[in-house]
Amino acid sequence: MNTAQLGKDLTSQLKLSGSTPASSRPSTPQLQESKKLIPRKELLEKVQQTQNEDISLCVVGHVDAGKSTILGRLLVDLGEMTSKDHEKNVRNSDKSGKSSFAYAWAMDDLVEERERGVTLDYAVTSLRTSNGKVLNIVDTPGHAHLVHNMISGAQQADAALLIIDARKGEFEAGFSPRGQTREHALLIRSLGVRDLGVVVNKIDSVGYSKERFDEIVAALTPFLLKSGFNKERISFVPCAAMTGENVTKRSHKVLESWYNGQTVAQVLDQFEAPRRPFEAGLRLPVHNIFKGQTAIASGVGVSGRLCAGVIQVGEKVRCMPGDEFAIVKMIEVDNDSVPFASAGTNVTVYLANIDPINLSIGSVLCSPTDLVPLASKFIAQILLFDINIPILPGTTFEAFIHSINTSASVSKLIETVDRNTGAVLKSKPRVLTGNSAARVEMSIGSQSLTSQSGSNTPSNNSIPVEKFTDNKDMGRILLRHEGQTVAAGIIVDYMR
């Protein structure tokens, strides 16, 4: 059935008055009085007319590289944070004996984050660049034991800033085999990020040294190219976030004597939004679940990033896995109520007629007439990183697929393939080693991982997935083992 026909069927089924069968109409008076849905053809035309250049940007890097400080500085310098709010952060951070964290507190607003001086979970904010482009920014944690939170944030990104600490020994620690600079770069590329800004921060701590900047660029460039980034889509920029040098403007004479390139803000300006699959079926993986706190924003609230399709107020949606349906009561984008939202948008959706017990992080909201597939096994083509452990049938991993974090094991080694062409090299290999590529059959674990690892996945063994060729965001997979990211790949087929 083609998209247009599906749209006609969806429109006729989901109208909340008129032709809707009595048995499927909402039971509450408020929902019965809802306006008719916008017909799908008209809705898609509206989406095309209102398509903007919004980009989701994740900020990653080794612990204490200055990620939150750079974002705080951008928010203040570009006018997204008022002088009053920044001065409040300055006073409070000074009282706490953490005056150097005043800009970081623009992003790190949890009590524990401020007490410890580190980012613990990913935080989302919006920033309008000098050319009017809107960036939905995700600030991610840098600690090794918080990689699962970093992945949750990076899964929502179109582009990324990789923050480097220029200080002697600090860059080397982050770029070591167990450092987060190396792992974060691999992760964001594996999650589909193509545009990368590499910000060499704290350049003032090395006397604005051109030699140090060139040394870092020379070390990172071959690694990033090997990881799959295109040289033309990588930008290197030095800055000193604490003083604001080269964040939005440049004035230091030593830096100006050898660097005449972009500021951090100008790097953000050059990122381009990818084409969004808004004509496809609705796919909204749930990243967070909460209860609405106001009369308007009441009911069950879920947030996430629309990976495909369009969602509108009044629409009936299906929660997968499960047999539960809900009515979209309200949609928020950047804290503003909107009548609809399309693919690529980070949204908060308030649902009616559903018990929160039937929702989990990792659930997917979709159209009742275009259900997301559920699978307990799938075929993945994976690329193994530089690892020392052999991969055998039965090896169990921590698997990340869209907003799902669960256990999965290799049930069969199908074949090894050429990393570049995908041509089969060997069928039914006995073992997989580092820096190789292979197709494997994987089974979802019988139990989700413990909360200590940050997992939260639907309780049964079937999870919502799609082939990478059908939906890129729903068809990527990351595998970790004993605290190390060991492989990334795509889902090429699945078994229900």
Image (spheres, grey):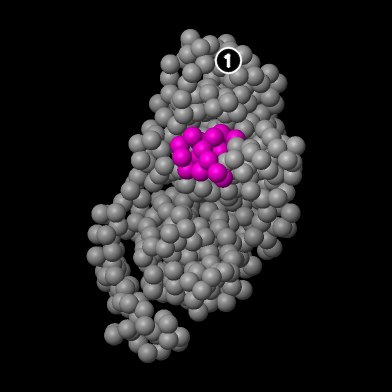
Instruction: Judge whether 227 appears above or below 157 on screen.
Output: above
Horizontal side of 408 relative to 47 (left or right) equals: right
Question: Magenta stretch: dominant SS?
Answer: helix
Q: Residues within 10 Å of mark 1 (few under 14, many from 20)?
A: many
Q: Position of residue 331 (x, y in %)?
A: 43, 65
Q: Position of residue 120 (x, y in %)?
A: 67, 46
Q: Is residue 347 visible?
A: no
The residue at the point 32 percent across, 83 percent down is: 17
Name the image quarter holding residue 202: top right
The residue at the point 44 percent across, 72 percent down is: 329
Q: Quadrant of the N terminus?
A: bottom left
Q: Position of residue 40 (x, y in %)?
A: 28, 67
The residue at the point 36 percent across, 79 percent down is: 34
- Disc count in the image? 1
The residue at the point 67 percent across, 33 percent down is: 100
Q: Is residue 73 magenta?
A: yes
146 or 483: which is nearer to us?
146
In magenta, the rendered stretch is 69-85
| Mark 1: secondary structure | loop
Q: Position of residue 180 (x, y in %)?
A: 65, 34
Q: Is residue 289 visible?
A: yes
Identity, as a three-letter code, of the amino acid under mark 1: Tyr
Instruction: Judge whether 468 appears above or below 198 on screen.
Output: below
Farthest residue, direction bottom: 22
162 or 384: which is nearer to us?
162
15 or 496: which is nearer to us?
15
Q: Which residue is mark 1?
A: 208
